[in-house]
Image (cartoon, grey):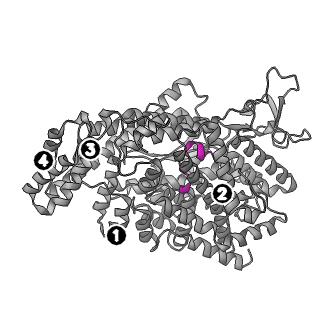
């Protein structure tokens, strides 16, 4: 769809004449011919590519045809030594620009991301202040971006996959640096994207359910006083915790499933969210005052379709950049080809290869046997193979409290945590010096640095009474992110290569740390039994998140096919897609159709096609697990993190000698099932 058509259809507004590439092909031909005449035919391909890259992003405000030609003639670098010096200068400058602005951005968002008390109106305004939005426009306005585009290629994914095996580390670094100039968009559109994503974050981070105000149909309040759970993470984790509680736990799990369904279907009464003054029965959807008095207003009025209004706000904001991305003209392509460096088709094939493997059916039947009942939809979160499955939540909370009373204690203990994981004492101390721990407003997250002088931040949610197991488990996940972030920034050979291939890979590091949380507490098991249980636990987790990931992909393809959708239409399409995914890959095993429970994930609303990273992350984490068991853990984590931001295929071949594949996970699960687990 063209920008003009998209604007007419209710999508992003069309690019204004001042913000359109307008140079004719003859302008590229003319400047290329003149430069080849000066520098020789050996430079012809590089000259033509560089000139075209500039022309595709050259707007009227940048000058006319003559200005374009003059710029190219004056700034093309034929000498490789000059190119290397220019690349180094650009890279060093961007590290400082990005790093310092990142630190300002973190401070502006601090009240929204960390638990500093109630959010004030001014906090939201500061969070919407996106200083980054002006960096790229300024780099184009000063023509630094054009200088880079003229002299270094913007590679498409297929080029990296085809040619990357023969590149040097510096060539990879140049390719990674040039990703940032693939899109040239007006600053106001970047600001609007920030506002939409921030609004989604606020909506999600404040979506709490007071479980002590939840009723059964016979009027009981089955959840403990003071239990407050964020959707969906807190609800899901409470559901998981109740597998150890027998029949009482089963009742709570069914109630939580009903709560989730009410939320995703937008049937939940608006008065229920974070409201201590009402009681709610999720099964009947009845609401009443907690003191039993007559309600002064209609408490049963459902939440408007805010969830899907927020989703549409994110969709329209990111789609508005489509006309400005010549190498990836849809957000879906930008998410996959530029962000993940994996095509949408390859990603879907990877996820489906796991969901349709025979080991899945065998495992589902085994789980039903272990539970002693037919599976119910919420059993997608079954935890029976977890090392902690036999441990009650209270026991885990007590172990955490004994070791980490609060955020400050966890901060102090990071060096010891890392040593227990397998890092040498001096490396553990070096890492700990570069990590700061903050109390999270939401479920928790990691925020790495972007320049080597800064520190990474670890955020986890800690109740007023102190750190519990859930907060500790999240902290271990985020610690994995932080360790990867530090090694892949402070230990990298080229700043432009900092990071890992995509978000899925940093999730793999996080999962690897999270799975070792009990060993840090001195409660972990080892040996073949532990490895078999871990294999089946990982496969079960990955089955569920593969389904959610495919749902996320279907939702975004539907949004692009229906850019004028209303919140009601988006809701119905999301629920229909959830049912379709369930019916294809889950119903044959569970024996129940038309379940829409997978739509509960908050990432669908606020994370813009992020979920496939989790599924890929689980698969990658398992591929790395065997190597991390056999090699010294700390040394191997460092080696892997310092590979940098290659393509997933190139990174995995350097890491384990083969491509990203579900085969190792399925083989380990098959061995565990054959062994009777």
Residue 189 placement: quadrant: top left
Of mark 1 and mark 4, the one earlier in the sequence is: 4
Q: Is residue 609 magenta?
A: yes
Q: Is residue 145 visible?
A: yes
User: Up-down: is 507 above or below 284?
Assistant: below
Q: Which residue is mark 3?
A: 145
Which mark is drawn over residue 73? Answer: 4
Residue 441 placement: quadrant: top right
Residue 241, position as x, y percentages in the image: 75, 53
Of mark 2 and mark 3, the one earlier in the sequence is: 3
Distance between the alpha carbons at the discs numbered 1 and 4 = 32 Å
The span shown in magenta is: 601-613
**Placement of the N terminus among the 4 image quadrants:** top left
Q: Is residue 225 magenta?
A: no
Q: Residue at x 19, y 53 (%)?
A: 85
Crowding near pointer 3: few (<14 within 10 Å), some, many (20+)?
many
The label nearer to you, 2 versus 3, is: 2
Q: Which residue is mark 2?
A: 581
**Residue at far left of view:** 38
Distance between the alpha carbons at the discs numbered 4 and 3 = 16 Å
Distance between the alpha carbons at the discs numbered 2 and 3 = 43 Å
Distance between the alpha carbons at the discs numbered 1 and 2 = 36 Å
């Amino acid at each position: 769809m063209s920008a003009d058509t998209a604007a007419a259809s209710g999508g992003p507004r069309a690019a204004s004449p001042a913000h359109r590439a307008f140079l004719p092909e003859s302008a590229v031909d003319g400047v290329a011919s003149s430069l080849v005449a000066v520098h020789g035919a050996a430079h012809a391909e590089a000259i033509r590519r560089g000139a075209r890259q500039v022309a595709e992003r050259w707007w009227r405000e940048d000058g006319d045809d003559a200005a374009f030609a003059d710029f190219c003639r004056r700034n093309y670098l034929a000498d490789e030594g000059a190119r290397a010096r220019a690349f180094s200068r650009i890279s060093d400058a961007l590290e400082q620009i990005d790093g310092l602005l990142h630190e300002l951005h973190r401070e502006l968002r601090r009240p929204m991301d960390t638990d500093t008390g109630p959010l004030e109106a001014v906090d939201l305004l500061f969070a919407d202040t996106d200083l980054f939005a002006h960096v790229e426009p300024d780099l184009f306005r000063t023509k630094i971006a054009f200088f880079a585009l003229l002299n270094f290629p913007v590679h498409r994914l297929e080029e990296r996959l085809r040619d990357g095996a023969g590149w040097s580390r510096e060539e990879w670094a140049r390719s990674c640096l040039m990703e940032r100039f693939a899109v040239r968009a007006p600053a106001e559109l970047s600001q609007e994207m920030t506002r939409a994503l921030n609004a989604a974050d606020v909506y999600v981070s404040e979506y709490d359910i007071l479980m002590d105000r939840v009723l059964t149909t016979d009027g009981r309040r089955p959840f403990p006083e003071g239990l407050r759970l964020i959707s969906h993470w807190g609800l899901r984790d409470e559901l998981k915790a109740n597998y150890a509680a027998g029949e009482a736990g089963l009742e709570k799990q069914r109630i939580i499933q009903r709560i989730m369904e009410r939320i995703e279907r937008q049937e939940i009464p608006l008065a229920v969210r974070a409201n201590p003054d009402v009681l709610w029965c999720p099964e009947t959807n009845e609401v009443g005052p907690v003191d039993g008095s007559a309600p002064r207003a209609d408490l049963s009025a459902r939440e408007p379709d805010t969830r899907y209004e927020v989703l549409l706000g994110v969709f329209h904001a990111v789609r508005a950049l489509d006309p400005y991305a010549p190498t990836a003209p849809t957000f879906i392509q930008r998410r996959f080809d530029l962000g993940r460096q994996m095509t949408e088709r390859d990603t879907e094939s990877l996820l489906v290869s796991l969901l349709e493997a025979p080991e899945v059916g065998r495992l589902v039947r085994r789980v039903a046997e272990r539970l002693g009942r037919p599976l119910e939809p919420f059993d997608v979160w079954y935890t029976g193979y977890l090392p902690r499955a036999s441990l009650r939540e209270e026991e885990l909370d007590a172990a955490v409290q004994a070791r980490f009373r609060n955020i400050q204690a966890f901060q102090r203990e990071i060096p010891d945590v890392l040593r227990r994981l397998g890092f040498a004492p001096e490396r553990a101390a070096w890492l700990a010096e570069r990590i700061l721990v903050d109390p999270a407003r939401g479920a928790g997250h990691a925020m790495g640095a972007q320049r080597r002088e800064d520190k990474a931040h670890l955020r986890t949610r800690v109740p007023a009474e102190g750190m519990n197991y859930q907060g500790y488990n999240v902290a271990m996940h985020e610690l994995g992110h932080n360790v990867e972030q530090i090694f892949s920034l402070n230990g990298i050979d080229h700043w432009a290569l900092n990071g890992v291939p995509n978000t899925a890979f940093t999730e793999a590091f996080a999962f690897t740390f999270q799975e070792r949380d009990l060993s840090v507490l001195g409660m972990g098991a080892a040996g073949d039994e532990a490895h078999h249980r871990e294999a089946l636990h990982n496969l079960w987790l990955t089955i569920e998140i593969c389904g959610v990931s495919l749902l996320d992909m279907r939702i975004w393809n539907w949004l692009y096919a229906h850019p004028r959708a209303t919140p009601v239409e988006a809701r119905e399409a999301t629920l229909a897609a959830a049912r379709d995914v369930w019916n294809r890959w889950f119903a044959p095993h569970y024996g129940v159709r038309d379940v829409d429970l997978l739509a509960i994930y908050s990432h669908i609303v606020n994370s813009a096609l992020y979920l496939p990273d989790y599924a890929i992350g689980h698969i990658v984490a398992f591929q790395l697990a065997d190597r991390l068991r056999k090699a010294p853990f700390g040394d191997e984590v460092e080696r892997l993190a310092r590979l940098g931001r290659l393509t997933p295929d190139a990174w995995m071949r350097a890491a384990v000698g083969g491509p990203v594949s579900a085969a190792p996970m399925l083989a380990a699960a098959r061995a565990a099932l054959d062994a009777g687990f």
